[in-house]
Every structure is written in C-alpha cells, then in structure tokens.
Amino acid sequence: MKFKTWSFAVFISIIALAATGNAQGRKMKIYISADMEGTVGAVTGDQLGPSGFEYNRFREFMTAEVNAAIEAAFEAGATEIVVSDSHGNGENLLIEKLPKNITLVRSWPRPLMMMQGIDETFDGAIFIGYHTGTTNPEGVRAHTISSARLADVRLNGASMPEAGINAAIAGHFNVPIIMISGDDAVVKEVSALLGDIEGAVVKWAYGFHSARTLMPEAAYDLIRQKVKRAIGRIKDFKPYKLKTPVQLDVRFKNYRPSEVLSYLSIVERTDSHSIRFTGKDMIEVSKFLEFIITYEPSLEP
C-alpha cells in the first residue's frame, strides 16, 4: 500500500511538472503596426514629417507609445514581438530607444504594406497611432494610404480605412486585431468594423487639424492598460476575413492614374477617377495597392 501511495504521488508530481513546463514553454507572438497621425498630441503636418518643426519631438512620442505597447505585451505574456514602422517614410521610430528583444520593419516598398512581417504564427496584432479613413468626415488627418492621391479604397464593395485593409491582411493569416490606439473617431470606426476590440483614445478630434489631447505620460499608461487587457482576453477576438476573390476598388483624386492603369488587362476603369482590380486573396490585393502607390518610371537604383 505504501508503494502504491508513493507511486501515485510521484505520478501526480510528474504531471504537475509537465504542465508547468508546457506553460513556461508556450509562445505568444504579437505584431504591432505603428502609424503617427493617431499619436498623442499630433494634429498637423508640423508633427508628422521631416519638414515639420515638431517632427523630431513627435518621433519621441511615437516611439514611447510603441514602447508602452511592447512593455505591456511582454508583461502580459508575449514571447516575441515584431514592430512595423508604418508611417510616412517608414523611418520614424527611434531604433536606439526600442528594446533589444524585438525586431523592426522599416522603409518601403513592402508587399504587405503596413503589415509586412505578419504571418500565421502570430497570436494577435495591435495598431498604435492610427487614424480614420478618407471617407470618414471625422478624425484627425483622416485619409486612406495616401492623403494626396486617393479618395476612396473599397474591399468587396465596402469603403475601408487603413485599419480595415490591414485587418484583412492579418485575417488572411488568421490573425485577429486585438487593440488600437488613436483618436476617438478611429476607435469608433474600427470597433464598428472589427467588433469589441480594446481601444485607447489618446485624443478627441475636433476637426481634421484639431483635437483635445491627453498628455504623453497619460497616453502611455492608457496604452499599457489596453494592451494588457487585450492580451488577457486574446481568445475573444476573431480574425477579420474577407470572401475571396477580393474585389478592390480605388478612387483617385486625379484623372490620369485611372486612365493609365486601365491600360493593364487586369484593371477595369469603372469611372473617370476609379479602377477595379480583383485579387485571388488579400496578398494579391496588398501587392497591387503597393504597386499603384509606389511605382514611378524614375525609380532608382
């Protein structure tokens, strides 16, 4: 009887140790796509590009917001994080101020645009510093992909903000979007599209170039809180998946892009400013979008 009791105890101990080992060995990969228009305090071009007199300061704020998300994700159980610098020239985040245990995607062009580096091995994706889409009458710096060139981008007939396009790319790999930060308008817009994701409102839009804003430290605290909450309920989120093939409609602000692109047999010109492309999936659609925004005959080297 003593032998049997001892054997049972040993058996229970082995099971417990195995369970502990599995828990410790479980991996969680998180993808972070960071834009800048939704960063705390950002309201005009003065903060958003190298020619702006506040740009260098706001690179610091953007980097700090991303760091807040990274720190919270690791604290909540993430074991690997990939960050995409997804604003402007893709060279905004201060690389020396990011932690050494992440990897960073920089510059352009990229086949998956703002989601380059994501794949089916990720457990969830986070959007930091995002803004509303070009057809939304609300939101600071509302636009989709290119404020200078595009008036609308539609997927399967539905007008999409960048967050929607990027969520569909993530959804192709069965990765859900779990959290977003930006102004109140983008959190409302993206929540309506994706469902009950966590949203960190760091400012409240008054107009295209005005807002009431949190202070930076308060924004970082809120982002940490929302990231931890999102990862804590990560099983609640579902990937945003589009029916395939995916129909892409793009409306340009100018006339000639639609005219010239219609010379391609894969492109249909649907009106004076608009074209249609059908891709077998979001990967083809993403590559086509990157092409029409990036390509110029003078590209070098």
Image (tube, helix red, strand yellow):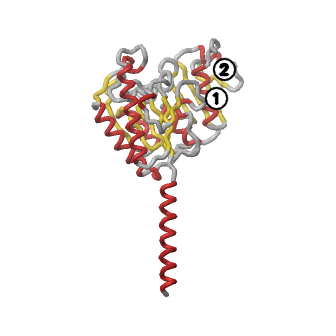
Relative to 289, 35 lies left or right: left
On the question of residue 151 being in view, the answer is no
Earlier-in-chain disc, 1 versus 2: 2
Amino acid of disc 1: Phe
- Across and down, in percent, residue 87 comes to 47, 26
Element marked by disc 1: strand
- Across and down, in percent, residue 106 comes to 52, 27
Q: On screen, 36 above or below 11?
A: above
Tell me which corner region of the image, top left, top right, bottom left or bottom right, holds residue 58: top left
Identified at 47% across, 21% down, the residue is 147
Tell me which corner region of the image, top left, top right, bottom left or bottom right, holds residue 294: top right
Within 10 Å of the Cα at label 1, are there few (<14), some (14-19), or many (20+) other Cα atoms? many
Q: Nearer the viewer, residue 243 or 50?
A: 50
Q: Quadrant of the C terminus?
A: top right
- Across and down, in percent, residue 243 comes to 60, 42
Identified at 52% across, 64% down, the residue is 18
On the question of residue 24 being in view, the answer is yes
Element marked by disc 2: loop
Identified at 66% across, 37% down, the residue is 280
The residue labelled by disc 2 is 262
Within 10 Å of the Cα at label 2, are there few (<14), some (14-19), or many (20+) other Cα atoms? some
Relative to 36, 151 lies left or right: right
Report the residue that reaches farthest toward the right. 265
The residue labelled by disc 1 is 277
Amino acid of disc 2: Ser
Q: Nearer the viewer, residue 279 or 224?
A: 224
Q: On screen, 134 above or below 148?
A: below
